[in-house]
Structure formats: C-alpha cells, structure tokens
Image (tube, rainbow, N blue to C red):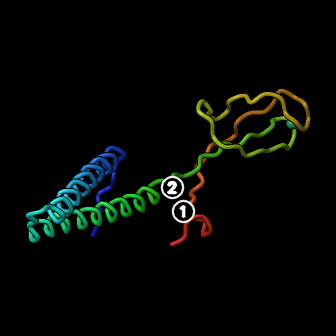
Amino acid sequence: MSKPRQSATGSALIYLVAIFLFMVAILSINVGLNMYFAPNSDLTSSLIYLSVGVVSIGLVGMTLLRVRRNSSMAGITPKVLSVVRCAQCSFKQIKSFAIGDYVFKAEGRCSQCGNESLFINGIYADDLRRRPNVLTG
Ligand SMILES: [Zn+2]
C-alpha cells in the first residue's frame, strides 16, 4: 500500500483538525461532567459526552503521533555540499551549500597557498538515508 506524500499544507491542515477535535473533546467532557453533576443528572447522556471526549482526545493523540512520525521521515532532506578547490595547489574543502553557490564560482583566497584561486569544483547532495547511524528504524 503506497501512501500519498504529505505536503506541508497537508500536515498543517491535520494540525488544525487536531486542534478542532481537541476543543470538541474538551467541550464534550465539560458538557458531560456538567450533566453528570447536575441535580437532575442524565447519566446516559453524560457518559456519551464523556466517551466522545475521551475518544476524540485519543484520536487527536494518534493523529499527531502519526503526523510527527511522517514529518520526521520526510524531514530528512539530503544535505547539499559544495566542494571548494584551489586551482594553484592541492587544497580541497567541503562546505555546506549556500544559496548562490554554483560550479566554478570564485571563492576567494586560498588558506593554504594564499592565491585568489579558490573556486567551487562541484556541488552534490549527501544522501543521509544511506548513513546507518542517522536514521534508525
Ligand atoms: Zn591554494
């Protein structure tokens, strides 16, 4: 069974629904308790309200847990790295990609030989999912 990918707006909607459900749950528990402790208490109705409230809270909890797990799975974006090299010497450095980086972009002075010959030699994505220590389970 393939799950549809959840967009950011999708999970935001789920959070909104969860908040709404949570408020409904609090309200039903409140109504249920009020009915229970009312002088002419309607026990059946109050129990129904209470169980609706409890079940709603359970649903909210389960939904939030699932969303959290999904988003933590989806949150693993590959880390983008830029390879900085010096044209004059053998200096090579890997830094995290910054917006505006492009291949052959001049990166300024080389810290090893002092020439203004640093440039970006390559940009690649480091796939974190291939690292066994990063993601467990
Ligand atoms: Zn150099």
Q: Which one is nearer the viewer's eye here, 2 or 47? A: 47
Residue in the picture at 26% in, 51% down = 23
| SS for dot 1 | helix
Report which residue position mark 1 lands on. Answer: 129
Residue in the picture at 25% in, 49% down = 20
Ligand 1: image quarter: top right
Report which residue position mark 2 lands on. Answer: 76
Q: Which one is nearer the viewer's eye here, 86 or 135? A: 135
Alpha carbons under labels 1 and 2: distance apart: 8 Å
Does the residue tagged 2 have its C-beta within 8 Å of any atom of ligand 1? no
Q: Which one is nearer the viewer's eye here, 42 or 5? A: 42
Residue 21 in the image: state x and y as whole percent.
24, 54
The picture quadrant where one finds residue 128 is: bottom right
Q: Which one is nearer the viewer's eye here, 79 or 14? A: 14
- Residue lying at the far front in this picture: please name it: 39
Judge left or right: residue 15 versus residue 31. right
For the residue carrying disc 2, how many other residues have a C-alpha within 10 Å: few (<14), some (14-19), or many (20+)? few
| SS for dot 2 | loop
Judge left or right: residue 80 versus residue 12. right
Judge left or right: residue 61 versus residue 53. right
